[in-house]
Amino acid sequence: MPLVLVLVLAALWSLYWVIAASKAQEFIDQALAREKANGLTVTCAKRRIRGYPFKFLLNCSGLKVVQETPTRLTTLTASRFAAAVMAYNFNHMIAELDGPYEVTRSRKRDQNATVVETRKLFSGTAKTLKSSIVLKNQVLKQTTVVLRGLTGTFVDYSNQSRPQEIATTLSEAILHVRSTGDVSKAAGPYDAGGVVNNLNFNGGMANLQSDEGTRFDNFVVRMNISNAPYKLRGKPLDWLKAWKANNGQAKITELAASSGAVKMKGTGNFDLDNLGRAQGILKAQMTGLDSLVKNLVSAGRIREKDADLGLAAINLLGNAGGGSVKVAIKAQKGNVYFGPFKIAILKPLFNP
Protein backbone atom coordinates (compact mmCIF):
# COMPACT_ATOMS: atom_id res chain seq x y z
CA MET A 1 0.00 0.00 0.00
CA PRO A 2 2.73 2.60 0.81
CA LEU A 3 4.40 1.86 -2.54
CA VAL A 4 1.12 2.42 -4.38
CA LEU A 5 0.65 5.71 -2.53
CA VAL A 6 4.14 6.84 -3.46
CA LEU A 7 3.51 5.97 -7.10
CA VAL A 8 0.21 7.87 -7.10
CA LEU A 9 1.80 10.92 -5.50
CA ALA A 10 4.69 10.80 -7.99
CA ALA A 11 2.22 10.61 -10.88
CA LEU A 12 0.20 13.53 -9.52
CA TRP A 13 3.35 15.58 -8.98
CA SER A 14 4.55 14.84 -12.51
CA LEU A 15 1.18 15.93 -13.88
CA TYR A 16 1.37 19.12 -11.81
CA TRP A 17 4.88 19.87 -13.09
CA VAL A 18 3.89 19.39 -16.74
CA ILE A 19 0.79 21.58 -16.39
CA ALA A 20 2.67 24.25 -14.45
CA ALA A 21 5.50 24.27 -17.01
CA SER A 22 2.94 24.76 -19.78
CA LYS A 23 1.31 27.60 -17.84
CA ALA A 24 4.74 29.15 -17.29
CA GLN A 25 5.33 29.12 -21.04
CA GLU A 26 1.99 30.88 -21.57
CA PHE A 27 2.81 33.44 -18.87
CA ILE A 28 6.19 34.18 -20.46
CA ASP A 29 4.62 34.59 -23.91
CA GLN A 30 2.00 36.97 -22.53
CA ALA A 31 4.60 38.99 -20.61
CA LEU A 32 6.84 39.28 -23.68
CA ALA A 33 3.86 40.40 -25.78
CA ARG A 34 3.03 43.15 -23.25
CA GLU A 35 6.63 44.36 -23.17
CA LYS A 36 6.82 44.35 -26.97
CA ALA A 37 3.77 46.61 -27.10
CA ASN A 38 5.71 49.00 -24.83
CA GLY A 39 8.76 48.99 -27.09
CA LEU A 40 10.81 46.24 -25.41
CA THR A 41 11.41 43.12 -27.51
CA VAL A 42 13.03 40.04 -25.96
CA THR A 43 13.92 37.05 -28.15
CA CYS A 44 15.83 33.81 -27.72
CA ALA A 45 17.48 31.73 -30.42
CA LYS A 46 16.31 28.75 -28.37
CA ARG A 47 14.04 28.67 -25.32
CA ARG A 48 12.93 25.82 -23.10
CA ILE A 49 11.75 25.05 -19.57
CA ARG A 50 13.24 22.11 -17.70
CA GLY A 51 14.20 21.26 -14.11
CA TYR A 52 11.83 18.38 -13.31
CA PRO A 53 10.95 17.38 -10.63
CA PHE A 54 11.48 20.14 -8.05
CA LYS A 55 12.18 23.33 -9.97
CA PHE A 56 11.42 25.23 -13.15
CA LEU A 57 14.48 26.34 -15.08
CA LEU A 58 14.01 28.72 -17.98
CA ASN A 59 16.93 28.52 -20.39
CA CYS A 60 17.22 31.15 -23.13
CA SER A 61 20.24 30.79 -25.41
CA GLY A 62 21.12 33.56 -27.83
CA LEU A 63 19.37 36.32 -25.84
CA LYS A 64 18.58 39.58 -27.63
CA VAL A 65 16.86 42.51 -25.91
CA VAL A 66 15.87 45.57 -27.96
CA GLN A 67 14.48 48.77 -26.41
CA GLU A 68 12.87 50.91 -29.13
CA THR A 69 11.86 54.56 -29.05
CA PRO A 70 10.72 56.77 -31.96
CA THR A 71 14.31 57.90 -32.55
CA ARG A 72 16.61 55.04 -31.53
CA LEU A 73 17.16 51.38 -30.74
CA THR A 74 19.21 50.11 -27.79
CA THR A 75 20.22 46.46 -28.07
CA LEU A 76 21.70 44.01 -25.56
CA THR A 77 22.92 40.57 -26.63
CA ALA A 78 24.22 37.75 -24.42
CA SER A 79 24.98 34.10 -25.01
CA ARG A 80 22.51 32.79 -22.41
CA PHE A 81 19.96 33.85 -19.83
CA ALA A 82 18.74 31.37 -17.23
CA ALA A 83 16.18 31.76 -14.42
CA ALA A 84 15.19 29.17 -11.83
CA VAL A 85 12.34 28.96 -9.30
CA MET A 86 11.45 26.10 -7.00
CA ALA A 87 8.27 24.28 -7.95
CA TYR A 88 6.83 24.95 -4.49
CA ASN A 89 7.92 28.61 -4.13
CA PHE A 90 7.37 31.04 -7.01
CA ASN A 91 8.35 34.07 -4.90
CA HIS A 92 12.11 33.44 -5.08
CA MET A 93 13.96 33.44 -8.39
CA ILE A 94 17.64 33.00 -9.19
CA ALA A 95 18.75 34.44 -12.55
CA GLU A 96 22.04 34.29 -14.45
CA LEU A 97 23.32 36.06 -17.55
CA ASP A 98 26.27 34.55 -19.42
CA GLY A 99 28.62 36.49 -21.68
CA PRO A 100 29.92 37.59 -23.97
CA TYR A 101 27.73 40.71 -23.81
CA GLU A 102 27.34 43.57 -26.25
CA VAL A 103 25.34 46.78 -25.97
CA THR A 104 24.73 48.95 -29.05
CA ARG A 105 22.64 52.02 -29.81
CA SER A 106 21.19 52.74 -33.24
CA ARG A 107 19.74 55.99 -34.55
CA LYS A 108 16.57 55.84 -36.64
CA ARG A 109 15.74 58.15 -39.51
CA ASP A 110 11.96 57.86 -39.36
CA GLN A 111 9.01 55.96 -37.89
CA ASN A 112 9.68 53.14 -40.37
CA ALA A 113 12.71 52.26 -38.23
CA THR A 114 15.28 52.92 -40.94
CA VAL A 115 18.58 52.64 -39.08
CA VAL A 116 21.16 55.20 -40.20
CA GLU A 117 23.87 54.70 -37.57
CA THR A 118 24.82 52.04 -35.01
CA ARG A 119 27.30 52.62 -32.20
CA LYS A 120 28.79 50.02 -29.89
CA LEU A 121 28.55 51.17 -26.28
CA PHE A 122 30.04 48.12 -24.52
CA SER A 123 31.36 44.66 -25.24
CA GLY A 124 32.83 42.17 -22.80
CA THR A 125 32.21 39.19 -20.58
CA ALA A 126 32.20 38.17 -16.92
CA LYS A 127 32.88 35.06 -14.88
CA THR A 128 29.68 35.58 -12.88
CA LEU A 129 26.60 37.74 -13.31
CA LYS A 130 23.79 36.47 -11.06
CA SER A 131 20.84 37.89 -9.18
CA SER A 132 18.50 36.69 -6.45
CA ILE A 133 14.99 38.17 -6.49
CA VAL A 134 12.44 37.77 -3.68
CA LEU A 135 8.84 38.86 -4.24
CA LYS A 136 5.95 39.44 -1.87
CA ASN A 137 2.44 39.96 -3.25
CA GLN A 138 4.03 40.18 -6.73
CA VAL A 139 6.14 43.15 -5.59
CA LEU A 140 9.92 43.22 -5.20
CA LYS A 141 10.84 42.58 -1.57
CA GLN A 142 14.59 42.29 -1.98
CA THR A 143 17.22 41.58 -4.60
CA THR A 144 20.94 40.91 -4.68
CA VAL A 145 23.08 41.23 -7.81
CA VAL A 146 26.60 39.77 -7.95
CA LEU A 147 29.09 40.57 -10.73
CA ARG A 148 32.58 39.05 -10.72
CA GLY A 149 35.48 38.95 -13.14
CA LEU A 150 34.26 41.55 -15.63
CA THR A 151 36.50 42.42 -18.56
CA GLY A 152 35.28 44.60 -21.40
CA THR A 153 35.43 47.81 -23.36
CA PHE A 154 33.25 50.90 -23.20
CA VAL A 155 33.33 53.39 -26.08
CA ASP A 156 33.64 57.08 -25.23
CA TYR A 157 31.87 59.28 -27.82
CA SER A 158 32.41 62.61 -26.03
CA ASN A 159 34.87 63.48 -28.81
CA GLN A 160 32.59 63.02 -31.81
CA SER A 161 35.42 63.11 -34.33
CA ARG A 162 37.47 60.45 -32.53
CA PRO A 163 35.61 57.96 -30.32
CA GLN A 164 37.92 56.32 -27.77
CA GLU A 165 37.75 52.90 -26.18
CA ILE A 166 37.87 52.53 -22.40
CA ALA A 167 39.27 49.19 -21.28
CA THR A 168 37.51 48.07 -18.10
CA THR A 169 38.20 45.37 -15.53
CA LEU A 170 36.32 44.63 -12.33
CA SER A 171 37.12 42.06 -9.67
CA GLU A 172 33.77 42.12 -7.85
CA ALA A 173 30.61 44.18 -7.41
CA ILE A 174 27.67 43.32 -5.13
CA LEU A 175 24.42 45.31 -4.99
CA HIS A 176 21.66 44.68 -2.46
CA VAL A 177 18.23 46.37 -2.34
CA ARG A 178 15.63 45.57 0.33
CA SER A 179 12.17 46.97 1.03
CA THR A 180 11.74 48.02 4.65
CA GLY A 181 8.06 48.98 4.41
CA ASP A 182 4.65 47.50 3.70
CA VAL A 183 4.76 46.42 0.04
CA SER A 184 0.96 46.29 -0.14
CA LYS A 185 1.08 50.09 -0.38
CA ALA A 186 1.94 52.08 -3.51
CA ALA A 187 5.29 53.40 -2.27
CA GLY A 188 7.65 53.16 0.66
CA PRO A 189 11.24 53.01 1.86
CA TYR A 190 14.12 50.88 0.59
CA ASP A 191 17.58 50.20 1.95
CA ALA A 192 20.26 49.90 -0.72
CA GLY A 193 23.95 49.15 -0.57
CA GLY A 194 26.82 48.22 -2.80
CA VAL A 195 30.44 47.07 -2.67
CA VAL A 196 32.92 47.36 -5.55
CA ASN A 197 36.44 45.92 -5.47
CA ASN A 198 39.28 46.58 -7.93
CA LEU A 199 37.57 48.58 -10.68
CA ASN A 200 39.90 49.91 -13.38
CA PHE A 201 39.31 52.18 -16.40
CA ASN A 202 41.93 52.94 -19.02
CA GLY A 203 41.50 55.14 -22.08
CA GLY A 204 39.50 58.13 -23.28
CA MET A 205 37.95 60.40 -20.69
CA ALA A 206 38.51 57.68 -18.04
CA ASN A 207 42.18 58.68 -17.62
CA LEU A 208 41.40 61.10 -14.81
CA GLN A 209 44.19 60.06 -12.46
CA SER A 210 46.94 59.56 -15.04
CA ASP A 211 47.68 58.32 -18.53
CA GLU A 212 47.46 54.82 -17.05
CA GLY A 213 43.78 55.30 -16.29
CA THR A 214 41.64 55.51 -13.18
CA ARG A 215 41.18 52.84 -10.55
CA PHE A 216 39.09 52.22 -7.45
CA ASP A 217 40.59 49.76 -4.99
CA ASN A 218 37.43 49.67 -2.93
CA PHE A 219 34.05 51.44 -2.96
CA VAL A 220 31.25 51.01 -0.42
CA VAL A 221 27.92 52.86 -0.30
CA ARG A 222 24.77 52.45 1.79
CA MET A 223 21.63 54.56 1.52
CA ASN A 224 17.99 54.87 2.54
CA ILE A 225 15.55 55.63 -0.29
CA SER A 226 12.22 57.17 0.73
CA ASN A 227 8.85 57.12 -1.10
CA ALA A 228 10.03 54.67 -3.76
CA PRO A 229 7.34 53.08 -5.97
CA TYR A 230 6.92 49.39 -5.18
CA LYS A 231 5.57 48.47 -8.61
CA LEU A 232 8.37 47.80 -11.11
CA ARG A 233 6.27 47.60 -14.27
CA GLY A 234 7.11 49.92 -17.13
CA LYS A 235 10.34 51.60 -18.13
CA PRO A 236 13.04 52.65 -15.64
CA LEU A 237 12.26 56.29 -16.37
CA ASP A 238 8.65 55.69 -15.31
CA TRP A 239 9.95 54.53 -11.92
CA LEU A 240 12.18 57.60 -11.59
CA LYS A 241 9.34 59.94 -12.58
CA ALA A 242 7.06 58.36 -9.99
CA TRP A 243 9.80 58.63 -7.36
CA LYS A 244 10.22 62.32 -8.21
CA ALA A 245 6.43 62.87 -8.09
CA ASN A 246 6.39 61.27 -4.61
CA ASN A 247 9.08 63.75 -3.45
CA GLY A 248 11.42 60.82 -2.95
CA GLN A 249 14.87 61.37 -1.48
CA ALA A 250 17.98 59.26 -0.95
CA LYS A 251 20.01 59.60 2.23
CA ILE A 252 23.57 58.30 1.94
CA THR A 253 24.42 56.92 5.37
CA GLU A 254 27.86 55.61 4.42
CA LEU A 255 30.21 56.17 1.52
CA ALA A 256 33.83 55.04 1.53
CA ALA A 257 36.22 54.85 -1.40
CA SER A 258 39.94 54.31 -1.84
CA SER A 259 42.32 54.53 -4.77
CA GLY A 260 45.95 54.20 -3.81
CA ALA A 261 46.87 57.10 -1.53
CA VAL A 262 43.49 58.76 -2.08
CA LYS A 263 40.82 57.83 0.46
CA MET A 264 37.38 59.33 1.04
CA LYS A 265 34.43 58.82 3.33
CA GLY A 266 31.25 60.81 3.69
CA THR A 267 27.48 61.14 4.05
CA GLY A 268 24.87 63.15 2.19
CA ASN A 269 21.46 63.51 0.58
CA PHE A 270 20.16 63.82 -2.95
CA ASP A 271 16.97 63.78 -5.02
CA LEU A 272 16.00 64.65 -8.61
CA ASP A 273 15.24 68.01 -10.16
CA ASN A 274 12.42 68.56 -12.68
CA LEU A 275 14.64 67.32 -15.53
CA GLY A 276 15.58 64.10 -13.74
CA ARG A 277 19.10 65.22 -12.84
CA ALA A 278 20.55 64.34 -9.44
CA GLN A 279 20.83 67.26 -7.05
CA GLY A 280 22.22 67.32 -3.54
CA ILE A 281 25.42 67.41 -1.55
CA LEU A 282 27.88 64.85 -0.20
CA LYS A 283 30.03 66.02 2.71
CA ALA A 284 33.29 64.12 2.53
CA GLN A 285 36.56 63.77 4.37
CA MET A 286 39.58 62.99 2.18
CA THR A 287 43.22 62.09 2.42
CA GLY A 288 45.53 62.28 -0.55
CA LEU A 289 43.63 65.13 -2.20
CA ASP A 290 46.87 66.84 -3.26
CA SER A 291 47.93 63.68 -5.08
CA LEU A 292 44.57 63.40 -6.86
CA VAL A 293 44.59 67.03 -8.02
CA LYS A 294 48.21 66.68 -9.21
CA ASN A 295 47.19 63.70 -11.34
CA LEU A 296 44.24 65.65 -12.75
CA VAL A 297 46.58 68.47 -13.73
CA SER A 298 49.00 66.00 -15.36
CA ALA A 299 46.12 64.47 -17.31
CA GLY A 300 45.03 67.91 -18.50
CA ARG A 301 41.69 67.85 -16.68
CA ILE A 302 42.46 70.87 -14.49
CA ARG A 303 44.68 73.87 -15.19
CA GLU A 304 47.60 74.18 -12.79
CA LYS A 305 46.58 77.71 -11.79
CA ASP A 306 43.01 76.57 -11.03
CA ALA A 307 44.33 73.62 -9.06
CA ASP A 308 46.47 75.84 -6.81
CA LEU A 309 43.57 78.22 -6.16
CA GLY A 310 41.14 75.36 -5.57
CA LEU A 311 43.37 73.57 -3.08
CA ALA A 312 43.94 76.82 -1.23
CA ALA A 313 40.18 77.39 -1.03
CA ILE A 314 39.57 73.86 0.27
CA ASN A 315 42.25 74.17 2.94
CA LEU A 316 40.79 77.49 4.08
CA LEU A 317 37.43 75.78 4.74
CA GLY A 318 38.97 73.76 7.53
CA ASN A 319 41.18 70.77 8.14
CA ALA A 320 39.66 67.47 9.28
CA GLY A 321 42.85 66.41 11.04
CA GLY A 322 45.22 63.55 10.47
CA GLY A 323 46.36 64.88 7.10
CA SER A 324 42.82 64.90 5.71
CA VAL A 325 40.60 67.73 4.47
CA LYS A 326 36.88 68.32 4.32
CA VAL A 327 35.39 68.76 0.87
CA ALA A 328 31.83 68.97 -0.49
CA ILE A 329 30.72 67.18 -3.66
CA LYS A 330 27.65 69.03 -4.92
CA ALA A 331 25.23 68.47 -7.80
CA GLN A 332 23.23 71.57 -8.70
CA LYS A 333 21.42 72.71 -11.86
CA GLY A 334 22.96 69.94 -13.93
CA ASN A 335 26.55 70.62 -12.83
CA VAL A 336 28.70 68.53 -10.48
CA TYR A 337 31.28 70.29 -8.33
CA PHE A 338 34.15 68.70 -6.42
CA GLY A 339 34.83 71.47 -3.91
CA PRO A 340 35.45 74.49 -6.16
CA PHE A 341 36.16 72.32 -9.22
CA LYS A 342 33.45 71.74 -11.80
CA ILE A 343 33.99 68.13 -12.84
CA ALA A 344 30.89 67.02 -14.77
CA ILE A 345 27.68 68.05 -16.53
CA LEU A 346 24.57 65.91 -16.03
CA LYS A 347 22.27 65.27 -18.97
CA PRO A 348 18.49 65.60 -18.42
CA LEU A 349 16.64 62.29 -18.13
CA PHE A 350 13.14 63.81 -18.41
CA ASN A 351 11.76 65.86 -21.27
CA PRO A 352 11.53 69.56 -20.29
Image (tube, helix red, strand yellow):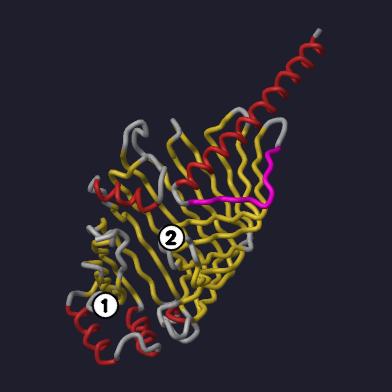
Q: Which residues are magenta?
A: 40-50
What kind of element bears circle 2? loop
Image quarter in which the N terminus is found: top right
Within the magenta stretch, is there residue 45? yes
**Residue type at tag 2:** Gln
Above or below, comparing residue 149 to residue 337 in the picture: above
Mark positioned earlier in the residue sequence (2 or 1): 2
Q: Residues within 10 Å of mark 2 (few under 14, many from 20)?
A: few
Residue drawn at point x = 38 percent, y = 71 percent: 263
Residue picked out by circle 2: 111
Above or below, comparing residue 131 to residue 339 in the picture: above
Q: Residues within 10 Å of mark 1 (few under 14, many from 20)?
A: some
Within the magenta stretch, is there residue 99? no
Residue drawn at point x = 50 percent, y = 55 percent: 174
Residue drawn at point x = 46 percent, y = 51 percent: 39
- Residue 140, how many percent across, how many down? 44, 39
- Residue 9, how many percent across, how many down? 73, 17
**Prevalent SS, magenta region:** strand
Image quarter in which the C terminus is found: bottom left
- Residue 66, how many percent across, how many down? 52, 56
Above or below, comparing residue 14 to residue 93 in the picture: above
Residue 145 left/right relative to 332? right
Residue picked out by circle 1: 342
Res 54 quadrant in image: top right
**Residue type at tag 1:** Lys
User: Which residue is the extreme one toward the bottom?
Assistant: 305
Q: Which mark is residue 250?
A: none
Res 50 quadrant in image: top right
- Residue 109, how many percent across, how many down? 44, 68
Residue drawn at point x = 65 percent, y = 36 percent: 56
Q: Nearer the viewer, mark 2 or mark 1?
A: 2
